[in-house]
Image: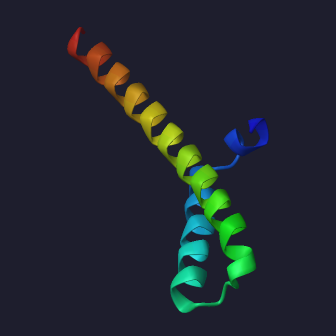
């Protein structure tokens, strides 16, 4: 999964949106569905990790600004 962490948030989110659209439109066969759901779970994990990291960074910056 080290390569997954290098994916930019925007790219992961866009790919996730594409997967959701394919599922909703019925474009995915039953055979592909499992793989798409697995990929979506990886992308969700990447997005969550990046959001939590960003939140931590912003909170740290705010703490530093408050202490000045």
Please give the name of the residue rendered at 48% of the width and 44% of the height, measured from the top-left corner.
Answer: 48
Quick one: which residue is furthest to the front in this view? 30
* Colour scheme of the rendered structure: rainbow
Please give the name of the residue rendered at 43% of the width and 27% of the height, measured from the top-left corner.
Answer: 57
Indicate whether 30 appears above or below 9: below
Q: Nearer the viewer, residue 16 or 11?
A: 16
Quick one: which residue is furthest to the right in this view? 3
Asked which quadrant contains residue 1, the reply is top right
Q: Nearer the viewer, residue 52 or 36?
A: 36
Q: Nearer the viewer, residue 8 or 25?
A: 25
Residue 15 visible in the current orientation? yes
Asked which quadrant contains residue 29, the reply is bottom right
**Image coords of residue 64 (percent x, y):** 31, 14
Please give the name of the residue rendered at 58% of the width and 45% of the height, measured from the top-left corner.
Answer: 46
Q: Quadrant of the C terminus?
A: top left
Q: Nearer the viewer, residue 47 or 35?
A: 35
Asked which quadrant contains residue 14, the reply is bottom right
Residue 55 shown left or right of residue 33 in the figure = left
Indicate whether 46 appears above or below 57: below
Residue 11 visible in the current orientation? no
Indicate whether 3 appears above or below 44: above
**Image coords of residue 65 (percent x, y):** 27, 18
Residue 43 shown left or right of residue 56 in the figure = right
Quick one: which residue is furthest to the left in this view? 66
Please give the name of the residue rendered at 55% of the width and 61% of the height, measured from the top-left corner.
Answer: 13
**Image coords of residue 43 (percent x, y):** 60, 54
What number of labels is visible?
0
Indicate whether 17 appears above or below 50: below
Residue 66 shown left or right of residue 46 in the figure = left
């Amino acid at each position: 999964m080290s390569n997954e962490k290098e994916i930019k948030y925007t790219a992961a989110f866009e790919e996730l949106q594409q997967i959701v659209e394919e599922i909703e439109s019925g474009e995915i066969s039953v055979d592909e569905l499992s793989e798409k759901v697995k990929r979506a779970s990886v992308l969700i994990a990447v997005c969550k990790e990046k959001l939590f990291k960003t939140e931590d960074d912003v909170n740290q910056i705010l703490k530093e600004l408050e202490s000045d």
